[in-house]
Amino acid sequence: MGDCSPRLNFLGLPDEDGVADIIIAPVPYELTTSYGQGTIDGPKACIEASQQVELYDDLLGEELPAGKVIKTVDPWDGEGGSLQEQLDGIAKYSTKLYDSGAFPVFLGGEHGILPAILRGCPQKVTLIQIDAHADLRSELDGDPYSHACSISRSLDEGALAVHQIGVRAYCLEELEMIKNDDRIHTAFARDITNPLEGELHWSNWLSSIEKIKGPVHLTIDIDGLDGSYVPATGTPVPGGLSFWHVIHTIETVFANCNVLSADVNEIVPQKETPLTQFTAAMIVTKIISAQIAKTR
């Protein structure tokens, strides 16, 4: 298991008594990485980087915690056990967090945690996915629970649909699913970032989010951003989203949708390149502030 102790609180916020409004939940899981390794240390690195993030949020017009109780809980402890046993453990961990009534933000780890997280969710959700990869493979190297299959397995677990943005790396099998499965809605990075027509595609993406009905889970693979923002990730891909694409997506999702939970994954921390974990920490901070703004 990744080392998340001694435990730091996200944003360096003090421990508070009382019922949590928002929970930061580290899930240092790494069993199916296919290229760069080190996502197991991602949660710890993100929380450490958050100590340097400013507490003032322009959406709220004040500093966090903005009158809310934000708690960082002990990490999922997956020491030992088979892949399936570890995924079962993540499902139990997520169930407890959902049952608490707080809004959980899960910090991976690799993206393979998503189907297990959703097993603990009390409602069937629509996924909003920020990612360089479609993650729609049936299997990778014989493993149907690979991080490259996280959306396929989530749909198997009962996710109602997925709205993807930033996708720019996929195989023919995944492209056929995108074309033929009406549960899958994809905004490709080459369209969103097109110098001539990108604004239209971007506007269409935001409009599609605003129309989503029912409960939503926001899942963010950090490689959805362009590699210049997040060089330290498992499978960096050029030509991705800007930081502000992601921030405006988060704000639009929370302003218009019934968001039950979120996750941020695939940080491979590098001490000499702290930009990735700092970017991830700022994204998590925006998720927190957008959730607070929604509940006011």
Image (tube, rainbow, N blue to C red):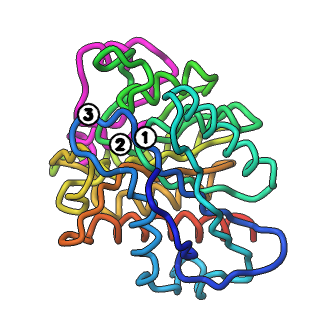
In x, y percent, where is residue 26? 54, 57
User: Disc 2 residue type?
Assistant: Asp
Q: CA distance from mark 1 to mark 2?
A: 10 Å
Mark nearer the viewer, 1 or 2: 1
Task: Report the front residue among 263 and 62.
Answer: 263
Amino acid bearing label 3: Ser
Q: Which residue has dot 2 on it?
A: 131
Tell me whether circle 1 and circle 2 mark residues in contact (CB < 8 Å): yes
What secondary structure is found at the residue carrying circle 1?
helix
Q: Magenta span has 56?
A: no
The residue at which mark 1 appears reads as: 111
| Cβ–Cβ under 8 Å for marks 1 and 3 | no
Image height of 244 relative to 260, above or below: below
Q: Which residue is mark 3?
A: 34
* In the depicted structure, whether residue 172 falls above or below residue 28: above
Q: Which residues are magenta?
A: 164-193
Q: Nearer the viewer, mark 1 or mark 3?
A: 3
Please provide percent x and percent y for residue 139: 36, 17
